[in-house]
Each structure stands twice: as structure tokens, then as C-alpha cells.
Image (tube, grey):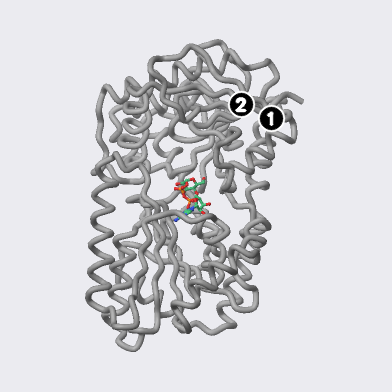
Amino acid sequence: MGRLVVASNRTAAPGEDRAGGLAVALWDALTERGGLWFGWSGEIAERETRGVRLVAEGNVEFALADLTEAEQQGYYLGYANRALWPVFHYRIDLARFDDSDWDCYAGVNRRFGRLLHQLLRRDDIVWVHDYHFLLLGQELRNNGWQEPVGFFLHIPFPPSEIFSALPQHQRIARALAEFDLLGFQTMRDVGNFRRYMAEHHGAEELPDGRLKAFGRTIRVEAFPIGIDADEFRRFAQGQDASAAAERVGRIIGDRALVIGADRMDYSKGLPQRLRAFGRLLDENEDLRGRVNLIQIAPPSRETVGAYRDLREELDRLAGQVNGDYSDLDWTPIRYLARGYPREVLAGLYRLARVGLVTPLHDGMNLVAKEFVAAQHPDDPGVLILSEFAGAAERMGAALLVNPHDVAGVADAIRRSLEMSREERIERWRALDEEVGTNDVAAWRRAFIAELEAIAGGGA
Ligand code: ADQ
């Protein structure tokens, strides 16, 4: 059996933060069979360095490449996060299309493709991750690599009309066709990709479901990512979790807790969520003084303008709702612009009556799954979930909402607060079954099995 080779922008190299389901899942996959994890070191070098830094841990090797300052600006903050991220999240209005950012993005994919190719052995299985490396498969081919390469997109794939707004969409599609297996989070993403390929590149669907395009045959499938549900369940019952729940419990007393936890990103629907909570208080006098929202939102990508604007909007909105409704002994929203360890979040999820997960668009959204895993089986909280989160495709037992519909979200919160224990338990059981069965280990096994089948000539 050959090695597994994973390529992703950031890795879980020694010294990096390994918390989080994805890092753990890939790490487990690599240790299981031995392998190599390739990616950006997180370091900025003065000038372009020729090689990679190799670090080994057990049977896993990390190959880490530095970026130059210009590459970080053009490839990472530029094309990946100012063009691809907004467009893939249906936000053409926030996208900046800059030819030099594109050149830089293509350049980093070319350089990284060359570096990775030098490290590959003939029977390796190669698995590339996410929107930073859309061109990496093609670059491996340019260097002569003929073995199978898989790709998984963690974020949504938008409808054809939106994807084709990217000035470089043709180049990207051509490069994606060089992968043998394309994995998306949901059937919706798969459908969007297939339609785009058919409309713009005359792709043909074969009877076995594979796609024929640019003279190549590719498998295109949904692999919904999950969490390590057992681990999160343990977190929720651990000491850090109880300590956090106790601290918060002392402050909120017997008021109902509504919880939100998201990276501060415009895809997460945070302003709409704060407005919905304001609307709830507006329309339900009886709830004033009886319910608290804790919104945890650590800032990310702060050098990108759209993220600075979001920060200001959230500061203002939280201040406004609190100004309008606070009383001497009650502040409705506790808005925390910082991150907390997942153990602490688990404790807050378990304490909460309602989990508010209302992104405008999201590849999957693992917070929704973590909220479910953290609940007490006899007295679970209610998950309110955006219909535009990938997670919604298989979590229909949540209260599904349109995050743009402020009144609808306010209603769903009210309904959750009034929901009988029987209904909460029934909904939660269905959700917990999904989260426990389709966990992160099942996700990676399914993807790797598919890739191996291709390598073995099974496809
Ligand atoms: P993200 O956009 O980062 O991931 P998500 O899947 O919700 O979104 O969260 C990732 C992790 O970060 C979770 O484990 C969560 O606990 C943690 N986290 C979130 N908010 C936090 C907070 N306030 N403090 C501390 N930790 C926090 C991308 C895609 C998603 C996709 C994942 C995995 O955007 O759609 O689900 O990759 O494929």
C-alpha cells in the first residue's frame, strides 16, 4: 500500500494547532498508513526559497514551504480570500478581481506543484484540499505525474452563473478536470458543478455518473464532512466544559441561553442574526429579561477590508440591541470578539437552550454538528440551522431557517424556547444519529476508498 499524501494550505505540523476535527482526521489517516503532509509553513521568507523544510513525526513527514510577502498578499489574502472565497460563497459583490493576484495565485500553485512533485513516489495516493490549491492537480500533471489525484472542496461550489463571473473560471475548470476525483460537501454543490461543466464546457455525464470533460473522465461526488462526535461528547462532559458552564450559569441564572459561535466572517450571517435577536425582543415583551444571546466570534483575515467592515457593523448592532433593551440587571447580548478552546465551547453548547447556526452560505458548518454532539440526551437544546449551510442537507430535524428572513429566525427562536421536551428529544435523536454515523472518520475513509479504487483501476 502506497503512502497517503495530503496537500493543504495549512498543515498540522509539530507546533501547529492540531485541535479541530479536520486536522485530527487527516492526521489519523496519515498515521494509519504512513504518509506525507505538504503545505505552507505559515512562515514568510525574505525571498523565494528553493526547497521545503522536512519534519518527521513517527511515520508521517511534513514538507513545509514558505511564502514570500508578495505571495502572501497576492495568493493568500488576494486571490484566495478576496476573489475565490467571496465568489464561492455567492458574494460577487465583495469580490476583487485583480490580474496580478491571479498571476500570483497561479504562480504559487506552480511552485508548490513542482515542490510536491519532487517528493512523490510512484504508488502514492495524493489528496489535495480546498480553494487555495485549485490548480495543484494540473501542476502535478505538468511535472509528469500520471497517478490518481483527488481533490476536496471544503467551501460551497456556487451556481454556474456565479462561478462563471470569475474572470479566470475557464482556467480553473480546465485545471479541476486534471483531478480524478472531485469531492464536494453536498449534492447541491455537486449539482452546481455538473451544470457549470455542462453549460460552459460541454461536459458529458457517463452512465456510471462520471463526468467527461476536456478529454478526461472524472468522478464527482458529495462527501459531507463530519466531526469526531465521540471526542466532542467527551469535551462536553469534561471539567473545562463544566467550569465554563458554571461561570456563565452564575451570570445568566435561570434565563434561557441562546448560543452562536462562528469565525467572524461575512458568510456566517452574523449581522442578520443579531437583528433577529433584536426583533425577538422587539416583538416579545415577555421574553425581555428572560433570555440571553452569547455570540462568540473571533476576528479572522483582519487585513481584508470586508472583514473590517463586518467587525464595525457587529460592534454597532450589538451595542444597539443592548442599548435598546438592557436593564439594570440584564444585558441581552454578550458579544465576544475572541476565540475559546473547543472544550469551553462544548460546555456552553450543552448549557444552551438554543444553538443559532445561521450562515448565509457555508460549505458544511461543523459548529452545527458540535452543538448536537454536546447536548444532554435527556434535556437537549434546539438547533436552529440555516437552509444554506451544507449541514442542512442531512440535518432536516433541526429547525431550518432562511437566515435572511429576520422575522422567521426570530420566530424560530421563540418556537425553540417554547418547544416541549418530547419534541426536543425527538429532533435531537435524529440529529445525533446523523452526526454520530457520518463522522469525520467515515468521511475520510469514504474519500480515500474512492481514490484507491481509481488507483486500483476499479473505476
Ligand atoms: P470554517 O469556515 O472555519 O470551515 P466551521 O466548519 O463552522 O467553519 O468551523 C470550524 C471549526 O472552528 C469548528 O471546529 C469550530 O468549533 C471552530 N470554531 C468556530 N467558531 C469558533 C469560535 N468562536 N471559537 C473557537 N473555535 C471556533 C471551513 C468551511 C466550512 C466547513 C469546514 C470543514 O467554511 O463550511 O464545514 O471548513 O470542511
Three-letter amino acid code of the residue under disc 1: Glu
Residue at 67%, 22% (x, y): give it: 124
Identify the image quadrant of the N terminus: top right
Q: Position of residue 15 (x, y in %)?
A: 57, 36
Identity of the amino acid at label 2? Phe
Left or right side of 451 for 262: left
Q: Does the closest atom of ligand 1 sit within 8 Å of the Cβ of label 2?
A: no
Front residue (pair 251, 226):
251
In the rendered image, the residue lying farthest to the right is: 1
Tag count: 2
**Label 2 Cα crowd, 10 Å radius (few <14 / some 14-19 / many 20+):** many
Q: Do residues under tags 1 and 2 come within 8 Å of each other at their CB atoms?
A: yes
Q: Which residue is mark 2?
A: 62
Image quarter where the C terminus lies is top right
Residue at 29 percent across and 46 percent down: it is: 307
Which of the labelled discs sits on residue 41, or is there none? none
Query: Is 287 rendered above or below residue 94?
Result: below
Left or right: where 304 falls relative to 260 = left
Residue 350 x %, y %:
56, 70
Report the residue marked by disc 1: 57
Is tag 1's residue or tag 2's residue first in the polypeptide sequence? 1
